[in-house]
Amino acid sequence: MKKILFLLVPLVLVGGAGVVYWQRSGQPSTSFRTTAVKRGDLTVTISATGTVEPEEVVDVGAQIAGRIASFGHDLDAPDKTIDYGSAVAEGTVLARIDDALYAADVESSAAQLEQAKANVLRSQADLEQMKAKLYQAEQNWKRAQELGPSRALSATDYDSYQAAYETAKATVAVGEATIVQTEKAVLQAQASLDRVKTNLGYCTIKSPVKGVIVDRRVNIGQTVVASLSAPSIFLIAKDLKRMQVWASVNEADIGNIHPGQPVGFTVDAYPGQTFRGEVGKIRLNASMTQNVVTYTVEITTDNSDGRLLPYLTANVQFEITRRPDVLMVPNAALRWTPVLQQVVPDARQELGNTGRRKPTTTRPAAAAGAGTAAAARPPGMVWIQDGTYVRPIVVKVGPSDGAMTEVQSDRLSEGTEVVLSEAVRGTASAQTVNPFTPQVFGNRRPQ
């Protein structure tokens, strides 16, 4: 029995130690995910989307109806016709409309003008003839007056000479009026000729400005119809070295936008590259979509290298506040809250008996409120690891860019490790504990 007991006692002791070790190793222990406080420049921005637009475009239309007969020639390549991207100068022929009908109208109006001029000459000749007849009638009437009604001149003849004189005088007045009428007819025929010549000139569509063809909206053989409005044929950008971004800004953010404000934007065509610009103007004609009011903001940018193409989609960042050389922590560090048992004992009293710190507004300042005074911001709190516990540090919260937030505290410096969350180890796999998940104290082991 003594030998058996001598062998069993060590086995029992070793087995009990193994059970205790197994039980302890099976219980999870808590660790904390931390990150270092950084120092750098913090920029608070407002995000928006927009479209890259040419700074000034001219819509060239047709003022007459007709069939497109041909296009003009490209300035850079004379053997090629005008097309998308062609450079044009002021007066460059863009297209020609079939002018057969308009040329016929010009010839007809020119003939009518010549006929009107001939009518003037004829009326002038008729007037001269009328004046000669008036002179003859006037002389006959004078002789009749000298003789008077007598045996040499009967009363009937006397009256005939007087009537002939009066008739000739009236005829001269009619002739003079006819000349005025025919001269006005000449002016009318000239105006008609000028009008049809203008229409004939409209058959040749020329560029009104120097620029680049952005859009060609017709093909050869297509018929354009100009009725109530001129149909658009070409869209010309005057200067693609100066571009604009038209961004839609929500009414809640428009108060932080002002002319001259610096702006950065990206386009999908050049990933990783940020273009710079500034606010030019805020359009006052707001639009409403599903009860959301937005304003269009014009952003001017330099495009000397020609990389920005019209109508690219731009992701815009309006710079609201720039804070150089400040301490920053991730927003998660300001949101995370431990349970009471994780806090160092000497700091638990000030946190209250709820197991969490007393409620304070620690949400980082949004971009829309970046213009408020720093003194008006409520204090926040971050946590640093103190052995197996965490210790609170009250900080003054500054602006936030959505990911990082400026903090101010005498107890923080660059490189200080602050807690982001906690990770439970010893389970099947380590997992991060969501700070917003309700914690049951009975299921948590004090560290």
Image: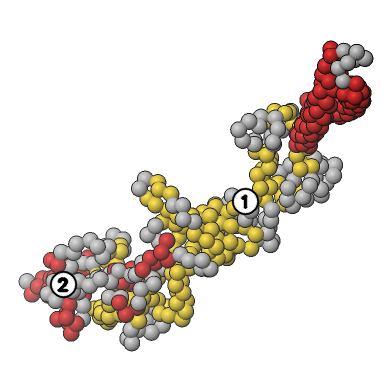
Location of the C terminus (image quadrant):
bottom left
Q: Secondary structure at mark 2?
A: loop
SS state under label 1: loop
Which of label 2 and label 1 is nearer to you?
1
**Colour mapping:** secondary structure
Left or right: 267, with 60 as reference point? left
The answer to whether residue 23 of the structure is visible from this angle is: no
Disc on res. 98: none
In the rendered image of this protein, does residue 48 appear above or below residue 196? Answer: below
- Nearer to me, 216 or 228: 228
In the drawing, does residue 262 fall left or right of residue 175? left
Between the residue at mark 2 and the residue at mark 1, the CA separation in whole angstroms equals 58 Å
In front: 377, or 196?
196
Which label is found at residue 355?
Answer: 2
Disc 1: which residue: 310
In terms of image quadrants, where is residue 290?
top left
Kind of residue at disc 1: Pro
Instruction: Residue at 47% x, 79% y: name it.
Output: 324
Corner quadrant of residue 126: top right
Estimate the x, y position of residue 445 in percent, counting from the top left: 17, 70
Amino acid of disc 2: Gly
> At x 83% / y 26%, what residue is drawn?
169
Find residue 201 and report its horizontal and vertical position in percent. Answer: 78, 37
Nearest to N terminus: mark 2 or mark 1: 1
Residue farthest along the left direction in this orientation = 1
